[in-house]
Each structure stands twice: as C-alpha cells, then as structure tokens.
Amino acid sequence: MSIFIEAAIRAVFVFGFLLVTVILLVWVERKFVSDLQNRVGPDRAGPWGILQTLADGMKSFFKESIRPTNVEVALFVAAPIIALMTALLIFMVVPIGAPVEINGTEYALVGADLNVGLLYVLALSSMAVYAIVFAGWASGSKYPLLGSVRASAQMISYEAAMGLSLVPVVLFAGSTSITTIVEQQQGTFLGVFPAWNIVLLPSFVIFLISGFAETNRAPFDLVEAEQEIVGGYHTEYSGFQFALFFLAEYIAVFNISALTAVLFLGGWSGPVFGPAWIAWVWPIGWFLLKTWAIVLFFVWVRASLPRMRYDHLMSFGWKKLIPVSLAWIILVAIAIGIRDFGLPWS
Amino acid sequence: MTSREMMHRSESAVSIELQTPDMTLNIGPQHPSTHGVLRLVAKVDGERIREVEPVIGYMHRGYEKLAEVRTYAQITALVNRIDWVSGFASEVPFILGVEKLMGVEAPERAQWIRLILSELARISSHLVFISSYPLELGATTPLMHSLREREYILELIEEVTGGRFHPNFNRVGGVKSAYGGGSTTKKQSMDLPAGFFKRTSEAMDRMDKICDDIDTLVTGNELIKMRTVGVGIIPPDKALEFGLSGPNLRASGVAYDLRKSDSYLTYDQVEFDVVSRPGGDCYDRYLVRLHEVRESVKIIRQAIDMIPSGPLQAKVPRVLKAPKGHVYSRAENPKGEFGYYIVSEGGKMPYRLKIRSTSFSNLTILPWILKGQLIPDLVAIMGSLDFVLGDVDR
Amino acid sequence: MLNQYYGDYVTVAVFVAVGAVLVGAAIGMSKMIAPRAPGGFKDVPYESGIEPILGGWSQSHIRYYIFALLFLIFDVEAVFIFPWALQLEYFDSIGRGMFALIEMFVFIAILLLGLVYAIRKGVLKWE
C-alpha cells in the first residue's frame, strides 16, 4: 500500500476519533459540572441531551462570522485555524492501543510513531499559543489584546516547566518515541505494582499543572477570564470562527489527558482477558479509561476552584515549578546512575 | 532642517526616557463584573490601573422626583425597587420615617414582622453576595449552591407579602393585612399564613447548613485566599472618610451597626453580635457578610419565640396627610446605612424625598481604592464592595 | 532506516494536508451557509458597549520582555537536556556515565544559579 494512502487513512481515523471524542467530551463536561452544581444540564437534544454539542456545532455553521472594523484580516482568519490544526495534529503521535495484527501484518494504533514524538508534542503545543496571541492582537480591540498578552506571559511561564517535567520520562525510557515510552511501562514493579511512570510523581504533578495552564483551563483560564477581560482573545470572534476555538480548546484538553495517560499512567497497559479475537480491545479500553479519568479530573477542578491571579500564576511557574523540576531531574539522574553503577561507595 | 539641527534633535530624542503610554479602557457599562451598568473609565498600563473614573447614571430612574407626585402609600411601591436584592429592607426606613412624621406607631406584632422580614431580606442579599463573589473570582459552583438556598428565603417572603423581590408590604402604621385592604379596614386584619414560623425555622436550619457548606467550599479555599487576603485594604480612617457603612465599614474594624447604636423596630429586644473584622481587605468583607447571615439566623430564631400576638395595623386616618415638617429616618440595610430625608409641606405627598442609598455612598471609595491595582484585583475589590446599580443610580 | 525516517515525516505532512482540507472544508461550508451582512454597530470592536477610545493597540510594558528573555534561556536549555537524557544510557554503556551525570549537574546548577539571581534581583516580581 502506498505510504500516502495509508497516512491519509490514518489521518481520517485520528481526526474522526478526535471529533467524536470532543462531541462527547463537551457533553460529559456539561453534565458532570451540572451534577456537581445540583443542576440538570443539557437534556433536550437527544437522550440525556447527548446531541447538544452537535446541535450547538450545527448552529454555529448558520451564524454570521462578524469581522470588526479594526482587524488585521490575515491573522484574524488564520488564528482559529492554527488553534484547531495544532490541537488536531498533537494527537497523531499518541498510541491509543497495542499494535494489532491483521492478516499477518502488524499495525500500530497510532497516527505516526515519530522517534521525536515528545519533542513534536512540545513544539506543537508551543505553536498553539500563537493562535491566541494572533487572535488577540489581530482583533484590534483592547480586551482581546489584554488576553493575548496574558496568554504569552502564561505560556512562557509554563512551557519551560512542561518541557523539563518530561526529561525524567525520557531518562527512564531512553527514547522520545511515545510508543517506546508506553512499552517501557508494561509489566510490573516488584511483581505487584504496575511499572508506570507515575513513580515520577513530581514530574506527573508538574506536567498536569502545566497542562492546565497550556489548555487555559480553570484555575488558569486567565486568557479568557470572563469576569476580568470579558472573553479574552476570542471576544471579537463569532459564528464558526468561534466554534473553531471552542473545538480546539476541548481537543487540547483531551490531548493533555491522553498524553498524561500515555506518559505517566502506562497508556494501554493493563490486564488482558479473553480469547485472542477480543484481546486487542482491552488495551484500547485501558487507554480510554485512564484518559477519561483525567478528563473528569479536569472538569472536577474547573467546578471547584476559582481563577488564579496571573502574577501569582507566573511566580508559581518560575519560583516553584521550574526549580523543582530541575532538582527532580538531578535526583532521577542520580537514581539511574545508582541503578547502573551501584552506590558510589560500593 | 539643517543636518546640524537634525543631529541635535536625534540626540534629544534619545536622551528622553522612553515612556509607555497608558491605554484608556472602558470597563462597563456592559461588562460581566460591573453588576449592571456601572462604567469605569480606566487608564491602564498593561493590567495595572493608573487611575479610574466611575461614570454612573445609566440606570437613573428618578425616584426622588417621582416621589414628589406620589402619595406616601404609593411611594412604598417605589422604594422597594431601589435595591431590588433586598426590597423589603429599603421599605423599612421609609415607612418608619413617615410614621415618625405623622406621629403614628405600628403595633408591636407588626414591628416584629418587619424585623423578621428585614432579616430575611438581609440573608437573601448576603446570599446573593456569597454566591456571586466566588463567581467573580472564577469559581462557578458556590453560585448554584447558595442561590438555591436563597430560593427558600424568597419563598418565605413571597408567602407573607405576595412578592419575591418587591414585597410592598409596609403600610403606614402597620403591615399589609391579608384582606388586601389599605390602611383602615373595619375587618380584623388577617395574620401571617399558618405554619409560617415553622417553615421559617426550617429554612433557618438550612441557612446554618449552607453557611457551613460555603465555609468548606469557599472560606478555606487557598486560591480564594490568594485572591482576596490583603487585597483592597481599606483602613478604618479611610472607610469613615469615604462614608462607608454596613459590612464594608465593619470589615475595616469599625463595629458600627445602626441596629445596635440607633436601634429601631424591636432590635433592642433581641440579642446578636455586631460582626466586625480588623483587616479591611476583600476577604474580611466576605467573612463579615458570611457571619452576618449566621447572626441574622440567630435574630430570626429569637424573634419567632418572642413575637407577641395582636393587631397588625394601628388606627390611622383614611386619608394620610403628613403635617408640615421634615424627618430623617435610617436603618441598617444589608448593604449599610439606608436613609430617607422626607420634607413635608403638609398634604398627601412629600415635598421632597432625598434618598441616601447605601451603594452610592459605598462606591465613592472606588477611585481611591482602585488606583494602582491590577485588573483581576479590580474585579475582586468591586465584588467585595457588594453594590447594586439600582441602589447607586436610584 | 532512512526510508522509515522520511516515512514518518511524510505521514506528518499528509496529516497536515488532511487537517487543512478538513478545516478548510468546514470553513468553506460555513461561508456558504452563514449569512453575511456587515456594517452598522456590530462591526465596532467591543469595549463594554461604549465606542472605543483611541485604537485597539497599545505598547506593552518592558517587563514582558524580561520574562521572554528568561523563557528563552530555559527553552534553549531544553535543547541540551533532552539529547543528554536520551544518550545517558549510551554513556553508561561505554562507561562514561559518571562524566555525563556530573557534567549535567554543573549545567543545571548554573541554570538554577541564574534563576536564583533573577529572583533575588526582583526581575520575577510583577512590577
């Protein structure tokens, strides 16, 4: 099969999977939050309101995209596209299950197993901030401008910590390919505990916190803080262009959840039961279970916490997360040294 | 221009310090955190506010002027629309003033009913604050929880007065009788709905519980503390200077409460503490209000035990006319001191009605307190002052 | 091996293309369906319901620049740390692990020193 056709098929699968997931994700978030707040939540469109997101999405197609007078047209149009594209592309390196064998050929359940997968993720998530900065700047309006300045300040405070938090994972796996990192987490530790990277607890915590900041989710949703700067960067966006931002944000949430599951919770690893023809479903199930657990954690945090002030956020990033992750890298490196050489005095 | 001149110019251009010009930002009238239509013209440098100028009047309804062509009985329907979050509480000082002017005194049971309803209005107003303040800081859940509890209070008010927001329940010399008549009917006034006190004390148990819930959800929350502790500090002298009153003043350490210091209705017969906090920051203003809910619950519980039976309405003439004179009447509203200055030239209508509305006086501190703050703090400070735009613009 | 290496990037390119087509098609569809009636007050940039005073752009304070510089340092540093993390096992296998380890300690110590210096200088204070 031509490599192009195979890649195109994979792309359609990955994007289709993401879009269906996002439709579910928005609904799950709204339902879960409404449960936490003693509300009913959406319940009109379809059973339990499950089609609500679809209805909202369809509606946005029929809405005018207003373009205010002051905008820089090219950037204004490009920004939501950048946002969505980067969100879509990040997921291509995340393996959603163990490789499956069909007719003797082994297919990896991943868009592409890049050997620089982790760096690719970091690069694209830095790209995502351009969308916000462009959107805010190109709007030619004051509140979006404040939003985009906040976005860049937030990004530079958390991007570095996020990158550093992944170094111990790379140290453990000796590779930046995400599939390799998952494979390294198979099996058990001392025979009982799963050998997940969750043992790198500080890394896990720092990555998750940076993930909240990267996706602009509460308590770090300063970029679109409604009570402070109205809608932030997307104040001037309407209609389908706004829907693109919305979509991108939720895909990003799912991406971060999936990455956390893959990098720290062992990805698809988990017990497999049953005959061979059903066994391939289990890894996908484990992956989805772990990912959705983190998605629900995101929603839970959003429902419980207020927003941070951005100078607190920045000093938290610079004075806590970065020094801690640097120190943690040293500790992990020493531990690996001991594992390979033994204790220095022995 | 000669080249020499050019050179001179460029040198001077280099030597002057580069300055970042301030951006003029309109916050309001259509902004999520201005509680309506307050407009702040802010000069901002990045997110630091250099100076701010409040612009009010977007919701001016001219109640003071309207009152000059209304009879005293009709004005009660206006005044509960000034601060709609606690409609009953703004009726009370007006009706007390009119009674003082006419030399009428309401029967004791009516006084107690006014007290209970005032305190219910206080709880309802503070619950709106307690729910909306975390929302302004970005937490969405407390809103749902405490607004639901407020519904029980509104139902109680509706049960007695017939209105959730605008009770229009006070009459000169008493409270509205259930027959819907005005001031003097030959018929015996009907009493409160059966079982009202039982339902009220049940609702008070709920209030205790929601206060505990809010305590766990908001009061101890580290992020809330980060946003509010030490933010927007109003020292006591400044608070007095700007004429703050109510919880805003008490949070600055001045334990001044009209219910105690200038007691009206039957507040001198119930026991309660004047809540005050020393800090004067946003967190203290929040805490004062939360504790006042508990105090109000205490007051209502006592009132239910102490309320005597008797008529609801004193004997007043069929046509209400006030003698020539003037009176200033004030009361401790949920938001602070609320006063009416009524001038009568004799006749059925007041000659002039001056409304000293609480939120307006509390807002005078805005330009001072917002100077040099960040935009997120602006939201926190404005929210903590707890104003209602209807009360500001009248 | 080389084929595999390029194959990965062909895949990325195809993903970008498919994504662009997808997003483009969606935008095109909405362009066709959605009404378009510019003009009037809805085209005025939002500023709390008031016509904006002056333009929508303003200069940012210099403090953002310093943060950006610091960020650059820490991001570039990742360029050094990631290859080191990848090759640590290799260094171990040729018996130079201790050298690699100590070398990185020195590097990170210098970085931390820089961060402490910045904090002590008050650069990271939001003023």
Image (spheres, coloured by chain):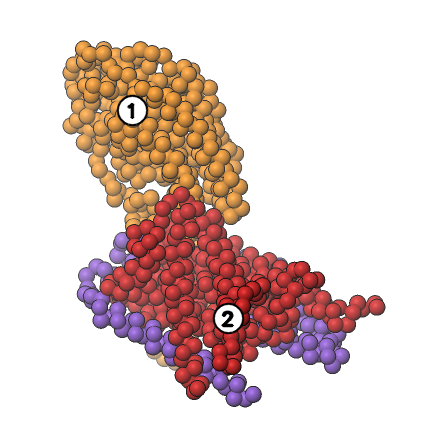
Chain colours: A red, B orange, C purple
Name the image quarter holding residue B67: top left
Camera-side residue of A9 and A300 = A9
Dot 2 falls on a residue whose secondary structure is helix
Q: Which residue is mark 2?
A: A277
- Residue sitting at 50 percent across and 58 percent down? A294
The N terminus of chain B: image quadrant:
bottom left
Query: Both on one chain, marks 2 and 1?
Result: no
Query: Where B148 sits versus B294, above or below?
Result: below
* Left or right position of A254 against A266: left
- Residue sitting at 76 percent across and 79 percent down? C95
Residue B4, image x, y percentages: 40, 79
- Residue sitting at 58 percent across and 61 percent down? A204
Residue B110, image x, y percentages: 31, 16
* Left or right position of A170 against A159: right
- Residue sitting at 21 percent across and 35 percent down? B62
The residue at the far front in this view is: A275
Camera-side residue of B108 and B281 = B108
> Mark 2 touching mark 1, by CB under 8 A?
no
Query: Where A334 sits versus B85, above or below?
Result: below
The residue at the far bottom in this view is: C2
Residue A238, image x, y percentages: 29, 62
Q: Amino acid at mark 1?
A: Val
Residue B25, image x, y percentages: 34, 55
Dot 1 falls on a residue whose secondary structure is helix
Residue B327 seen: no
Q: Which chain is mark 1 on? A: B
Q: Which residue is mark 1?
A: B160
**Which label sits in the foreground, 2 or 1?**
2
The C terminus of chain B: image quadrant:
top left
Q: Amino acid at mark 2?
A: Trp
Q: Which chain is mark 2 on? A: A
